[in-house]
Image (cartoon, grey):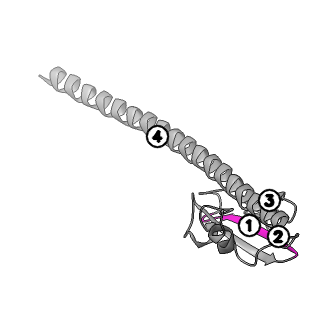
Amino acid sequence: MVELFNMIKNNQAKSLIALVIISAVIILALRIAIEQVVRISIAQNETNALNTLRIISTALENYAKDNSGVFPSSLVTLSETKPAYLDKSYLNQPYMKSYNYNCLRLEPSGYSCSAMPVKCNLTGKKNYLVVTGGSLISEDCDKKE
């Protein structure tokens, strides 16, 4: 009878160890999968931010070409003209694809517009800036100056 009790006790211990090992493997696999999903999401967000800034820059440059080299004072102007240079005002969106957009300088002589992640290293890793002429500049959002 004692032998039977020891066998049951040993099997329960082995089962518990097996469950702990299986749980650890599952948790590790989930962590790796979640990290991949976040990386892919960040890459998509950064691509969307770059494309949006290119769209804004192209619209601003085209407007200036059609208006004797004078840039508009507002992006809203670009969506209100006939034909419209932009289909919507990107600056008025709360955030699009996890980036905030802002035109820090929008003057008759030029512009600079930026895209910054809502949460650095979670929704994006780069800040982007497009300036007059369509030049794009990027830097890490967590860069300490």
Residue occupied by mark 4? 30
Decide which of tag 2 and tag 3 comes sooner along the chain.
2
Q: Which disc number belongs to residue 139?
A: 3
The residue type indicated by label 2 comes to Asn
Locate the C terminus by quadrant.
Answer: bottom right
Q: Relative to residue 75, is residue 9 drawn left or right?
A: left
| Residue at point 81%, 65% (across, down) | 66
Q: Are marks 1 and 4 in contact (CB under 8 Å)?
A: no
| Residue at point 54%, 70% (across, down) | 94
Mark closer to the observer (2, 4)? 2
Decide which of tag 1 and tag 4 comes sooner along the chain.
4
Report crowding for label 3: few under 14, some 14 to 19, many 20 or more residues within 10 A (C-alpha). Answer: few
Q: Is residue 112 above or below residue 127?
A: below
Q: Are marks 2 and 1 in contact (CB under 8 Å)?
A: no
Pick the residue in front: 25 or 6. Answer: 25
Q: CA distance from mark 4 to mark 3?
A: 31 Å
Number of numbered discs present?
A: 4
Residue occupied by mark 1? 114
| Residue at point 16%, 21% (across, down) | 4
Which range is magenta?
109-119
Report crowding for label 2: few under 14, some 14 to 19, many 20 or more residues within 10 A (C-alpha). Answer: few
Mark closer to the observer (4, 3)? 3
Pick the residue in front: 68 or 38. Answer: 68
Residue occupied by mark 2? 67
Mark closer to the observer (2, 1)? 2
Q: CA distance from mark 2 to mark 1?
A: 23 Å
Estimate the x, y position of residue 92 in percent, counting from the top left.
Answer: 58, 72
Q: CA distance from mark 2 to mark 4?
A: 55 Å
The residue type indicated by label 3 comes to Glu
